[in-house]
Image (tube, rainbow, N blue to C red):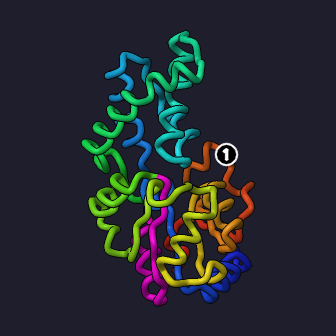
Amino acid sequence: MSDHATAALSSLLSRADAVIVDLDGTMVDTMGDFNEALNRMLAELALPAIGAQHIEHMVGKGSEHLLRSVLRHVLALDGSAQSAMKIEELYPAAWASYQRHYLAINGQFAGVYGGVEAGLQALRARGLRLACLTNKPTDFAQPLLESKGLAGYFEHVFGGDAFERKKPDPLPLLKTCEALGTAPARTLMVGDSSNDAQAARAAGCPVVLVTYGYNHGQPVRAVDADGFVDSLAQLA
């Protein structure tokens, strides 16, 4: 980072009482898990496989959106009618299969990004309170954090099913701030996508994005954010 970017990040952290951290694409590279679970699901439904390069554009908006996007994609490959009715007919079986397969492999094909633990340790050393907020279902998120040795850094872990709405809606951030007992303006959001940035802006939270995440396959530096880091270690 440039000296200017480093100073700006230091200023953001000096004004923060807490940090909310995203999971997929920010702390853990879970693309391998998505690829494995989704293709096991598709095989079970006798549908064509999907490549990781396509999945990357679909993750980040919750499992429901992911499954419908995958079904829409593979039905097109299969030459089937892509009607909303066809997708909804398949959805219950797809959801049950995906849930079963993802829980069976959760974390086995995923890895923690370099610098994540150093960054979390640095934030804790500053006396900042930490929460993890993800659109991933809580039943997937909590075991993943535990298996990767990250759960102990967080006072709270909220998944996409914890509140009535998901990011990019501001509600999950506002509810997480309530749980932490901090004002949004003094609660930094750290994520990897426009979902995180839009939710933070609407909630009144400052936001920093990592440059290595998913962001629906789009360039992350084009997103409106207060700063960018190439590693969470730069939060030190």
Q: Position of residue 228 (x, y in %)?
A: 65, 66
Specify whether residue 24 is in view.
Answer: no
In the rendered image, which quarter is residue 223 located in?
bottom right
Task: Please tell me whether residue 25 is drawn above or below residue 70 in the rendered image.
Answer: below
For the N terminus, give its image quadrant: bottom right
At x 65% / y 74%, what residue is drawn?
Answer: 205
At x 46% / y 43%, what residue is drawn?
Answer: 63
At x 67% / y 45%, what residue is drawn?
Answer: 218
At x 65% / y 67%, what residue is drawn?
Answer: 200
Give the structural element (helix, strand or loop) at label 1. Answer: loop
Q: Position of residue 162 (x, y in %)?
A: 44, 60
Would you name the residue on which mark 1 appears? 218
| Residue farthest toward the top in the current orientation of the protein | 79
Q: Is residue 28 left or right of residue 17?
A: left
- Highlighted range, magenta: 113-135
Task: Please tell me whether residue 48 is drawn above or below residue 110 in the rendered image.
Answer: above
Q: Position of residue 20 (x, y in %)?
A: 52, 71
Task: Judge whether residue 116 is colored magenta.
Answer: yes
In the rendered image, which quarter is residue 100 located in?
top left
Specify whether residue 198 is in view.
Answer: yes
